[in-house]
Amino acid sequence: MILGFYPYVHSFIIKSALFYFIKMRYFLELAYRGTNYQGWQKQPGDRPTVQDTIELSLSTLLNTPTSVIGCGRTDTGVHAKQFFLHFDLDKELPKNFQYRLNKHLPKDISIFRIIPVEPEHHARFDASHRAYEYRIITRKDPFEIDTAHYYAFSRFTDQDKMQEAAKLLLDYEEFFPFCKSNNDANTMRCEIYHAEWTFDEHQWVFNIAANRFLRGMIRLIVGMCLNVGQDKISLQEVKQALEEQSLLKKSLSVDASGLYLKDIRYPFIP
C-alpha cells in the first residue's frame, strides 16, 4: 500500500509546483499627461518615464519587482487618453488595489481598469486598432501650453488642401516619408483606417487610426498637411514621395504637446 501511494504523492508535488509557478496576467487601462516624462519607455539615466513610474509603484505596493509591457511607445511630451499595459504576478491582486495604485501614482497618471486576462494575451502584439489625435489651437491660450500646438498662421492656410492631404494617405500602405530617420522598424507598412481633419473656430484636430504606426509618423504627417495648406509643398510632391518611398523635399515635425494616443482595441476586451 505504501508503494502504491507514491504515484499519488508524486503527482501532488508536481501539481503543487506547477501551481506555484503559474503567473496571472493583468491588463491595466490608463491615461497619462506626458508633459513631465521622457516618453513611455524606460530610458538610460535618471530621466523619468511613464513606464518607470508605474513599475516603481507596482513594485512598491506588491512588494516584489514588477515589470510592465505597454501597448506602444509614446515620445517625450506625448499624452495618452487611453493606454494599456500588462504585467504578470504569481498571486491575486490585493483588495482595493486600483484605488491604492492611483493614490500612489502622481496626479498625471490615472488607472481606469484592472483586467485579468489569459496568460498568452499581450498588450502590444494583440492590439488590433490604435488611434491618435493631434490638437492645434489657432488662438494663443496660456492654459494649453503643454496640451496643444499653437499655430499662428491659420488664416494663411487652406483647410481644403489639408483635408486632401490627409485623405491621400488612405491610398498607400508604406510610409517611409513619415518615419524618423533613427528608427528600428522592420517594415514601413501600415494599414491606415481613417485620416481626417475637423476644423472649429479656434481648434483644429487631426484624427488618424491604423493597425500600427512608425516612429514620429503622426507629427510628420500633421506637419506635411500644414505645409500643403500653406503651399510650401504640393499634393503632387506628397504623392511622388509616397509612390517612390522617398523623403519629402520639405518636411516638418510638429511639437509633441498636441499629440494624444487613444482608442486602443483588443478582441478580448469589451
Image (tube, rainbow, N blue to C red):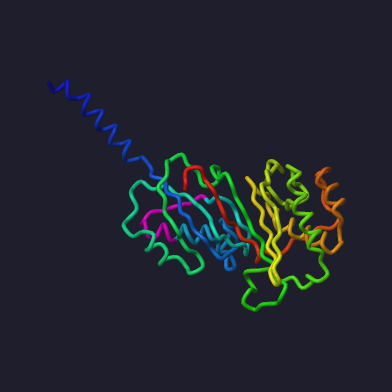
Q: Is residue 143 above or below residue 47?
A: below
Looking at the image, residue 254 sits to the left or right of residue 266; the answer is right
Q: Position of residue 81 (x, y in %)?
A: 55, 60
Count of picture labels: 0
Q: x, y percentage for residue 149?
A: 69, 68
**Residue at position x 77%, y 73% in the image:** 152
User: Is 240 rendered above or below residue 95?
Assistant: above
Q: Residue at x 73, y 59 (%)?
A: 222
**96 with respect to 202 (left or right):** left
Relative to 33, 176 lies left or right: right
Please provide percent x and percent y for residue 232.
Answer: 86, 61
Does residue 115 belong to the magenta stretch? no
Q: Does residue 156 appear left or right of residue 189 in this picture?
A: right
Magenta range is 57-69
Vertical arrangement, residue 132 with respect to residue 102, above or below: above
- Towards the viewer: 266 or 36: 266
Between residue 105 and residue 189, name the one nearer to us: 189
Quarter of the N terminus within the rendering: top left
Percent of width and height locating residue 12 = 24, 31
Residue at image point 26% right, 33% down: 13
